[in-house]
Image: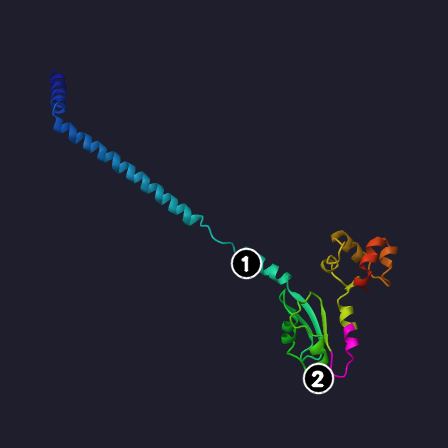
Amino acid sequence: MFENDRLTQVISFITSLLKRPYFLLKVVIFVLGLLSIGAGGWFSLGKVGKAQATQVCPISDSSSGEIDSQEVASASNLTLDIGGAVLKPGLYELKSGSRYADLIAAAGGLSKQVSKEFVAKELNLSKELKDQEKVYLPFEEEDIRTVQTIESNSSLVSINEATADALQTLKGVGEVTAQKIISGRPYSELTQLVANKVLSEKLFESLQSQLKL
């Protein structure tokens, strides 16, 4: 009976408190405060988790891109041969898009014995260079016509020495045909391209003036 009286007293006490508006307001404020604190803690935890994820898996530029660009730049360089009346004749590697003036500067400049007539009439310093090109600057005593023949021959594509890329600069020659030309080496005559069925007769006729052994 004592326990029943105690329980009755507790229930009566709580009932009297609930009948007081001021007490109810305080309870509501207290509950809202707990909910606010819980929501703030959850939001902060989410931000911390996100920050940690960002640190663990940062987004950064890959160094492989730099390597690839360097490889591409290296592949686009020109290998050139310059001889004759320059201070340092030889092989040079220049950037793609370089001009005759750049190659002559790399070779130390013109020799004092260079043909003044050739420089004045024939040398175009602004002309863009091509890969594997041979440039020859004549001396004063040399015949310009001989030099023109040398330069004309140097612009031809060698079917015995040219790379697959160089062969593909020829109109009508693709990757497959270029490999067929390389596989058929060495050639003793240009006409072997047709005889060995590497090129069709029509294609050979259109390219003959651009080829050399």
Query: Is residue 34 toward the left or the right of residue 171 in the image?
Result: left
Query: Is residue 3 toward the left or the right of residue 158 in the image?
Result: left
**Mark 2 closeness class: few <14, some 14–19, many ≥20 residues within 10 Å:** few
User: Residue 103: within the magenta?
Assistant: no
Residue type, label 2: Gln
Secondary structure of the residue carrying numbered label 2: loop
Of residues 204 and 4, the one nearer the viewer is 204
Query: Is residue 42 toward the left or the right of residue 206 in the image?
Result: left
Residue type, label 1: Glu
Q: Give the farthest residue toward the top.
A: 1
Work out whether residue 198 can be spotted. no
Q: Residue at x 41, y 49 (%)?
A: 55
Circle 1 is placed at which residue position?
A: 66
The x, y position of residue 95, in whole percent, is 62, 66
Q: Are marks 1 and 2 in contact (CB under 8 Å)?
A: no
Of residues 26 and 164, the one nearer the viewer is 164
Of residues 100 and 213, the one nearer the viewer is 100
Circle 2 is placed at which residue position?
A: 113
Q: Is residue 182 above or below residue 150?
A: above
Quadrant containing the C terminus is: bottom right
User: Residue 145: within the magenta?
Assistant: yes
Q: Nearer the viewer, mark 1 or mark 2?
A: 2
Q: Residue at x 22, y 32 (%)?
A: 31
